[in-house]
Amino acid sequence: MGVPLPTLQWYKDAISISRLQNPRYKVLASGGLRIQKLRPEDSGIFQCFASNEGGEIQTHTYLDVTNIAPVFTQRPVDTTVTDGMTAILRCEVSGAPKPAITWKRENHILASGSVRIPRFMLLESGGLQIAPVFIQDAGNYTCYAANTEGSLNASATLTVWNRTSIVHPPEDHVVIKGTTATLHCGATHDPRVSLRYVWKKDNVALTPSSTSRIVVEKDGSLLISQTWSGDIGDYSCEIVSEGGNDSRMARLEVIELPHSPQNLLVSPNSSHSHAVVLSWVRPFDGNSPILYYIVELSENNSPWKVHLSNVGPEMTGVTVSGLTPARTYQFRVCAVNEVGRGQYSAETSRLMLPEEPPSAPPKNIVASGRTNQSIMVQWQPPPETEHNGVLRGYILRYRLAGLPGEYQQRNITSPEVNYCLVTDLIIWTQYEIQVAAYNGAGLGVFSRAVTEYTLQGVPTAPPQNVQTEAVNSTTIQFLWNPPPQQFINGINQGYKLLAWPADAPEAVTVVTIAPDFHGVHHGHITNLKKFTAYFTSVLCFTTPGDGPPSTPQLVWTQEDKPGAVGHLSFTEILDTSLKVSWQEPLEKNGIITGYQISWEVYGRNDSRLTHTLNSTTHEYKIQGLSSLTTYTIDVAAVTAVGTGLVTSSTISSGVPPDLPGAPSNLVISNISPRSATLQFRPGYDGKTSISRWIVEGQVGAIGDEEEWVTLYEEENEPDAQMLEIPNLTPYTHYRFRMKQVNIVGPSPYSPSSRVIQTLQAPPDVAPTSVTVRTASETSLRLRWVPLPDSQYNGNPESVGYRIKYWRSDLQSSAVAQVVSDRLEREFTIEELEEWMEYELQMQAFNAVGAGPWSEVVRGRTRESVPSAAPENVSAEAVSSTQILLTWTSVPEQDQNGLILGYKILFRAKDLDPEPRSHIVRGNHTQSALLAGLRKFVLYELQVLAFTRIGNGVPSTPLILERTKDDAPGPPVRLVFPEVRLTSVRIVWQPPEEPNGIILGYQIAYRLASSSPHTFTTVEVGATVRQFTATDLAPESAYIFRLSAKTRQGWGEPLEATVITTEKRERPAPPRELLVPQAEVTARSLRLQWVPGSDGASPIRYFTMQVRELPRGEWQTYSSSISHEATACVVDRLRPFTSYKLRLKATNDIGDSDFSSETEAVTTLQDVPGEPPGSVSATPHTTSSVLIQWQPPRDESLNGLLQGYRIYYRELEYEAGSGTEAKTLKNPIALHAELTVAQSSFKTVNSSSTSTMCELTHLKKYRRYEVIMTAYNIIGESPASAPVEVFVGEAAPAMAPQNVQVTPLTASQLEVTWDPPPPESQNGNIQGYKIYYWEADSQNETEKMKVLFLPEPVVRLKNLTSHTKYLVSISAFNAAGDGPKSDPQQGRTHQAAPGAPSFLAFSEITSTTLNVSWGEPAAANGILQGYRVVYEPLAPVQGVSKVVTVEVRGNWQRWLKVRDLTKGVTYFFRVQARTITYGPELQANITAGPAEGSPGSPRDVLVTKSASELTLQWTEGHSGDTPTTGYVIEARPSDEGLWDMFVKDIPRSATSYTLSLDKLRQGVTYEFRVVAVNEAGYGEPSNPSTAVSAQVEAPFYEEWWFLLVMALSSLIVILLVVFALVLHGQNKKYKNCSTGKGISTMEESVTLDNGGFAALELSSRHLNVKSTFSKKNGTRSPPRPSPGGLHYSDEDICNKYNGAVLTESVSLKEKSADASESEATDSDYEDALPKHSFVNHYMSDPTYYNSWKRRAQGRAPAPHRYEAVAGSEAGAQLHPVITTQSAGGVYTPAGPGARTPLTGFSSFV
């Protein structure tokens, strides 16, 4: 109670009820406190506070709750514990009285007030404690509580985990600096719990997230990468988990390479000139004891090499010995511990040892005699290590071997010359030779003595005490003593015995005698001429040649029996006596003392008489012979030795001898390759014995025009009937003939034998002139002269050559090659080994076998590039910019020449586009130090060897080696893309030269105004490329430094300034770009500029672009030019090229525009970058070479090309001509000869526009080496690969001269020529090639004949007759073919033509026909005309008349025959004629009427008017086919022969009218009509009555004729006056003369209708021969014969209406018993009658012009009268055709052809 009303507040145990927030406690409105569902925990002190503004008051009470049923105040909960730990299960219960607690597990009481089990304890609170807990304790546990008020229980699950523990604790570890250290911490734990590893270093927890270098793996292992000394310490591994914790500790030691020794000093060793003393300060050992030191040295800037490899660790100094005088040395030292070799110390300064004389002699001394007074000495320098200075030259000393005496010396003042030709020596003398090198310090050691002889000389004295005497008539004996030994000047190879006739000094007989060193020498010369005076002499010879001969002595060979007497002959042959004559023997063989003549009756020795005559008697008359008796007469000459050979002959007394007859019946048998047996029947012996048989033959070419040569002669075999012909050529065609000879002379030749061919045999000879030349590095070219045709000995198609070759230095089997072309003259042997000598032989073979082998020739392949790479190539990086390579030499079999040095090809992998090269000269150095390399870059390396020819094969596989790492370069492209007032963002790119693995970056920055050392530094990882700096001062300048780090440390920083401002813009472009001309080189230039405005943001870098003029694109040269730069050197440019450049700046905002372009800048010229290409050297003459090349590519000229230089020199290793080869004793000498100093090259300059040059005045039979360079004003290009050429052999430079072609026969031409001029032959001409072809068809007919004999004449055979040929000739020698001569022409002679191509007949009536023929297919000459012969097959009325007509000229190939007899078959023969007649073409033809032809028309009637004649007739029988037309035949009274007069009369016509003007006045005509159908011409009608051509009323009686005559007289007078004026001009025209008729015929002959033919025959000659015969052989009465006259007419001028009439027609008739000789072309020249039918038609201008004006291009109709105007086409008749070619049909030729005009008479 209180005022104001107080507020009440309840407390329980001093805690406000409101704070307990127990829902069972509720304050009532009356102020009381109600507690519902009372619990034991509700017991306590309750306080009530009442308060108002007046104060407060409180009261309290204690509530005690009793007899309450048990209630859990803390129920058991699931519990998890670790094995071995203590587990407590809570169970708190309230109740009154206090409940009893019991714990059960699966109904087993574990703990209660009365039960206790070990490890289980009931706690006061009611909980259960299990200590320790085992795994099997896991399960459900139940807590039971009970009192008097009740009971309750609750359960909980106990989970037991396995205990966590470290089973693999970390171990103490030692790692190498920079590697990764791994500390393991392996633990076991319950899989239901998670672990956490905590690593501590020196009790300080590690935070791996702060650095990427330290990583804790999932298995707890600690990985520390890039370890360094800061990582040394004690590391503990702690494991934290719900399953327990554990920890272990280990020690980590980091060791590294020892540091480099310091203060390395070098000083000379006073006691030893070849040693120095090194000292140094001991370095840091890298936390690992130093094991030893390594001392390296560099000699003369050569790569470093280890000199002392194991200097004790306690040492700080060492003496270095074994050094070479006069060389500079640098030293460095490194320490080695268990990690490895540390860094080298700083290199010492270069120290040079004093020079000393060479300590070793030159090596490989080789001496070889060059001449008989000189020795070539060659050597190689002493080993380089023994030079002891720079060699200045050599001293060569020599003296006679084995004799005391002073040395003579030669000073070679150039160390590059390693040979010396010692001259002025004694012939064939042994010398001992020594060589020593010298330098500036003096002369070195002399080499051991080598001995060598000078070459042999020729003896200088003749043999002594020479005695000669004749042993017999053909042999002389020689006795002599050798010359004094000191005058032989060499090795005595023997002696030559000389003998020559006193009257013929050039005919020397030489016999070689081997030396005999015991007693007096002797020898014989045999086969000398008998009884002849000889001069004799003896000489001694050595290998070089002959010595002087002894004094000649005159010796006569002894007498002998004489030879046979000559020219035995008989004269004054009577019945009882005859005179015998003879001449002295050709071989007297002594003094002729007389002659012995003997004679006897043939076959009766008992009748022999002998008579001896004196030596002056050469004839003897034998008397007392029996008449008509055959005697054998012998004559022999006599000397003092005896009677000589007998010459014998038989003769009949009283019968003078005649020329013998020809042998016959030649039969050939026993044919072998080289002989044949000829059997024959002897001819008439001419009444005396046959003394000689002569056999001739045609060899190879058989024919009537081929020449005969004498093959064999047999003497003194008078009764021979068979001869063995020896010495024939195998596989050759022969045809034989023979003649026999007696004392009178030779007989005619026998008929030719059959053609035989000898059998095949192997070739007898080997190819000649075999030479071998180097073709390439792997091939040799073999040349030879092929076998001529005559030596094939077999089928030419089977002839070939076999070549065998083998290496000279190996006894290996030979390799064979076959050349199948018999005409081949050279062959290239491929796939040989380089730089190797081979021996070669060759032989010819055919189908039967092979011939002998040629002499061995030797050749060496050319030096080449090595075919293998150096071996055992290894590389080691010795620093960040150097790699040391070592290798061993190329295997000897693959060197292919002299190794001049090595090239190292190196390329930064993925960086350099092309490899660079480093050259190591010489073949002794086999290591190289590549310097100036990029740092920490992987390089691809290869090594190759090279010879003077070029580079060999690079080594494989590629060697990969990385240079060592180093501190990196600065990062690039540093920009600040975001700049705020208080922060900037910096972005960069990695260094262009990382020089190792980038481990991170360091950003340092400071205010530009602050102290230089107050940088704020931040490190970031290697992958970070940007960083934001915050908390900066606004509008302030900051300096940023950015550097990268490798394991070698921090690199050079990149510094930039930035202003914390937001007012920035892009920079202005640079300006005033300038390239100073003085800064321009061939491959670089220097660009200067002035930077533009930076846009309030500092410029970070510049970007430069370059454009090549004229059409190049802009290319970025660099985009990282320093922002501080105002100039930049631009390199990698092309020489002599114009460029433009531009520049832009970049700041943090972006790029500026590009600056203005510079003016065009042209780089300077440089030497050409490549040599001329395709260089070839070809022999041009025997002393000149033609050099040809291709210019270098334009892009490699590097300037204006001024010309070329050709360097050439003589190579010594192949000398001599022919098959001589120089033999060197060993390859070293060969190399020495090749390594000639450059100064031995001669130089030839050539114009820049030329691509060829001739080198002249070279030595013959020498091999030259040629290289070329291109040059400009700066210098020369690299040299081309050397080419070699052999001088002395060249193809002939000119063609043969004065080529003449002469025809021999119709199929042969003889070609003669003169050889090329001697100065152009370029060697021995081995033969000629003759090219010949028909003039108008070279491609189809060209042939080539090879003449291997150098004779300037050849016969071309089997040619086409009367054909123009062109002939060209080239000469060839061993080097090849020369040029061809200009073609010369020649034409073969004419020959008989072929047969006419066809024979055809047309318009066959009962008395006439037309015969025509074709031109021969092979004219074989100029066709002069034709002969036509015809005769009846059977006699007509007992007479067989043979008519021969000769047609002159070729244009007329037809004839009109008009003298046939009805129904008779005739035999026609036609021949063409050139120089003689060819074969005939024959055919038979039967005179009409033809079978099936129409019958004769009837009732022929002739009606005559004043100016016309009209013929009328009635159609007769039509025959088998309808009549197609008619023809009219006429017979003039002055000719008497029927001939066609009108043709092509239509079938419907029964009359025909013609003008009387067409007939000749005063001549009477008879007419008859012939019907025509398809079968041919029918039977003619009966003749009409004779009609005269006289006009009824003479025209001169008409009045108008008188008027015309008056007017004509006036005109004539005027014409006469005019004619007198032109009289002089008319003299050039030939007057018409009347021909005279000369005839031998017995009767006159007229030609009917001859006028039709006269015009056509005006340009031909016909010569006709006729023969009449009866069966009884008597002559027939004269009768007309067609064409038997030569037609001429005084009315016809030779020039008529423009037609030239020059030729004539003649016909001749002879009886059958007349001579067979034909009449000549001029036998008959009769003139035409003045008023002939021919003249009548020729005088008609209308007719003539109608013929002349025929349309061009149209052939006349075959059956049309050209003379009759308005006539219609008649029936088409089928001609009878005979032809040589199938399918030929006679039809008139085309326009312009001279075909017969049908309807014309007289041979039309």
Image: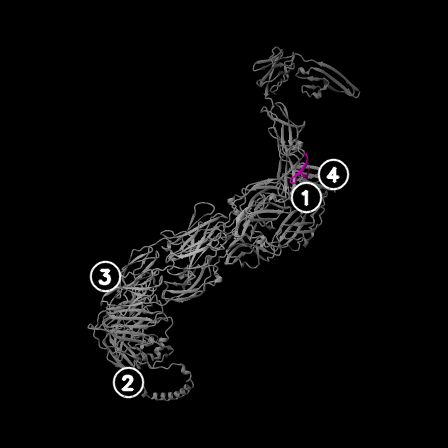
Q: Nearer the viewer, mark 4 or mark 1?
A: 4
What colouring style does the render use? one colour
- Please rate how many residues cluster around mark 1, counting C-alpha atoms within 10 Å: few if below 14, some from 14 to 19, many from 20: many
Sequence-first tag of 1 and 2: 1
**Marks 4 and 2, how far apart at CA:** 163 Å
Instruction: Give the quadrant of residue 1208.
Output: bottom right
Q: Which residues are magenta?
A: 263-283
Residue holding disc 3: 606
Residue 639 horizontal/vertical position (percent): 33, 62
Residue holding disc 1: 975
Name which residue type carries label 2.
Answer: Glu
Name which residue type carries label 1.
Answer: Val
**Marks 1 and 2, how far apart at CA:** 143 Å
Give yes or no for contact between labels 2 and 3 (Cβ–Cβ under 8 Å): no
Residue 1413 horizontal/vertical position (percent): 31, 69
> Can I make out residue 1764 in this image?
no
Q: Nearer the viewer, mark 4 or mark 2?
A: 4
Secondary structure, mark 3, is: helix
Instruction: Give the quadrant of residue 1136.
Output: bottom right
Q: Is residue 43 magenta?
A: no
Q: Is residue 256 or residue 1085 the one in the foreground?
A: 256
Residue holding disc 4: 1013
Sequence-first tag of 4 and 2: 4
Compared with 1038, 594 (above or below) is below
Give yes or no for contact between labels 4 and 2 (Cβ–Cβ under 8 Å): no
Residue 296 horizontal/vertical position (percent): 63, 39
Q: Identify the image quadrant of the N terminus.
A: top right
Instruction: Give the quadrant of residue 250.
Output: top right
Name which residue type carries label 3.
Answer: Asp
* Residue at the farthest left position: 1672
Name which residue type carries label 4.
Answer: His
Q: Is residue 251 or residue 667 the one in the foreground?
A: 667
